[in-house]
Image (spheres, rainbow, N blue to C red):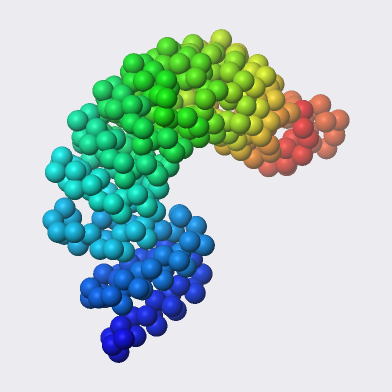
Amino acid sequence: MSPHDQVYFAQLRTLLFEEPTQRIFDIILTLFHNWEDSPERDVGIQYAENHLQSWPDEFRQARPEDCWRVFPSGNPSPSFRLIRHLHFSPTEFRADEARKLVHTPYMQHVKSLTLASNRIQADGIKIFMDSPYLAYLEELDLDYNEIGDEGALHIAQSPHMSRLKHLNLNSNGLTKEGIESLMHSPYIQGLETLHINNNNIGPDGARCIAKTAASMNYKELHLAGNAIAEGLEALANTPALSQLHTLILDYNHIEPRSAVALAHSPHIRQLEVLSMSRNNIRDEGAIALAQSPVINHVKELHLNANSMTVNGVKALAFSSYLGSSLRQHSMKRLSTNILREESQKLEQPELQSAKRKELLKALLETKS
């Protein structure tokens, strides 16, 4: 082994015994980028691969230029196989670039692929879906592209998507037809996270998600900006959503009746994040949620711009299910007079002359 190779090996060993971080992984890729092609470098890559097996995948992210100097020209570095998350910067992804990428055997090592804002259309996504080298993909981020319902069908029909757990199709021009294709796919089973914000799936699309939820494993549903309206009622009545911890429903024309249905759900009881801003749930929906065990574990709650009056705010502020930080957020929206009226229930005469800060503290220490 040449002195030059010995230096690189020594540096590599030192890096691999550092605490795993994204920064250390970036340095490792740079080291291989600078290490001239040789049998010793290949041995180094194998050595790194063996040690990196114990690293969390989240620290093994890269961009194409980190492992492919002049993509799509030439060939990728063998260090490509060390990568688990591949991120493409927003650009316009051409068909020839897509073909070159997906025909690279190293892609079989990639578990997460981010192609957000790349103007990918249906024919472009088909190139990806036809590649057997994507068979180990667990996460696919196509946020803000142009695949439409036809592209969703290509994803649904791909036998290489059977390991997919996290799918992001925000802002892709989907309608209920696209969602039906995905939900009835014989290959996509066990999805844990689905992002389809800012499409147009409507109530029927939400009903389709509810109807097929038993074949999935949903932990997060991001459905903002889809006009699902009364389709929320089907989701609320779905036993298969019992493990859901994040539900995003902003901008969906949701009326009080549907919010009440969610509040009365006997299945959705593990929510930690609930966002329903920019709807029309009004006081009726807010009060129903405030009195519901559905919000018992919620740590992040967004109900802004819902035609709510002080009555809805009061219900949230004094909910027996919400944690103190969320109750405080609502209390701060109430006038000092209302806080003083509520403090009378505590039978603490000294509070009648207390300042606002003292009233808030006393009320927060008492669950309704």
Task: Look at 58% across and 25% down and name the residue there.
Answer: 241
Q: Is residue 9 above or below residue 236?
A: below
Q: Is residue 165 above or below residue 103?
A: above
Task: Look at 25% across and 63% down and name the residue there.
Answer: 77
**Residue 261 at what x, y percent from top left?**
60, 14
Q: Is residue 60 above or below residue 266?
A: below
**Residue 222 at what x, y percent from top left?**
45, 30
**On the rendered image, what quadrant is the C terminus found in?**
top right
**On the rendered image, what quadrant is the N terminus found in?**
bottom left
Snapshot quadrant of residue 170: top left
Along the horizontal axis of the image, is 152 left or right of 302? left
Snapshot quadrant of residue 61: bottom left
Task: Look at 23% across and 47% down and name the residue there.
Answer: 103
**Residue 56 at what x, y percent from top left?**
50, 57
Snapshot quadrant of residue 272: top right
**Residue 121 at what x, y percent from top left?**
21, 31
Task: Look at 64% across and 40% down and name the residue there.
Answer: 325
Q: Is residue 62 above or below residue 26?
A: above
- Residue 185 in sight from this viewpoint: yes
